[in-house]
Image: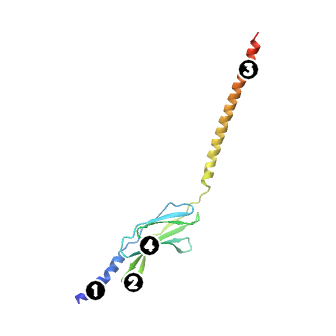
Amino acid sequence: MKANRLLTVIILLPVFLAGNAAAVTLNASEVSASSVTLSWTEHDGTGFDRYDVYVNDGLGWALDRTIWDSFITEHEVTGLESSETYSFKVTTVVYNSTSMAYEPEDSNIVTVTPEEIDMPFLFMLLPIIVIVVIVMLSMMLMKKTAARMKQEGQEEAEVEEESEAP
């Protein structure tokens, strides 16, 4: 009878260990017009098999990437369309040796809308470039005008000297 209880405890121990794994906490950062970087807390239980990263564009969940290393806790999702709303989740899949099954544990769901970029960076610099060019041209024109006035003044002085000469 004692041997049967011990065997039951040994068989159920992996169930308790695998069942104690907590779902990961998901965060989104570096949201651009076409991508988002997801990061999550590392799986802290036993029986880790993989992380599955899912994207939902409003049409349902689609697998974006499978990560087989429990230490990799970041993934960049690319190919997003600006101004569309996307939801993301990471599923930690753990192996339950008693039932010989893989059990998914979902993370919290993060929803983002990539920012629409109205104009490229170069177009934002264009007004500054135009102002700098105008200032430089104005300075060149002022220097030419000052040089011409100086030359005219010297010519007038020479004419006055010649007219005053006996």
Question: What's the residue at 71%, 25% (across, down)?
Answer: 151
Q: CA distance from mark 2 to mark 1?
A: 17 Å
Residues tagged 2 and 3 counted as in contact (Cβ below 8 A): no
Question: What's the residue at 62%, 52% (across, down)?
Answer: 122
In the image, residue 121 above or below residue 93:
above
- Report x, y in % for residue 104: 43, 77
- Amino acid bearing label 1: Leu
Can you name the residue that lies furthest to the top here?
166
Question: What's the residue at 42%, 80% (across, down)?
Answer: 102
First along the sequence among labels 4 and 2: 4
- Report x, y in % for residue 60: 54, 75
Q: CA distance from mark 1 to mark 3?
A: 118 Å
Q: CA distance from mark 4 to mark 2?
A: 19 Å
Residues tagged 3 and 4 counted as in contact (Cβ below 8 A): no
- Report x, y in % for residue 5: 26, 86
Q: CA distance from mark 3 to mark 4?
A: 89 Å
In this rendering, would 45 be left or right of 57? Answer: left
Which residue lies under the disc numbered 1? 7
Which residue lies under the disc numbered 2? 100
- Amino acid bearing label 3: Glu
Colour setup of the view? rainbow
First along the sequence among labels 2 and 1: 1
Which residue lies under the disc numbered 3? 156
Question: What's the residue at 72%, 18% (across, down)?
Answer: 157
Residues tagged 1 and 3 counted as in contact (Cβ below 8 A): no
Q: Few, some or many C-alpha atoms within 10 Å of disc 4 (few <14, some 14-19, many ≥20)?
A: few
Q: Few, some or many C-alpha atoms within 10 Å of disc 2 (few <14, some 14-19, many ≥20)?
A: few
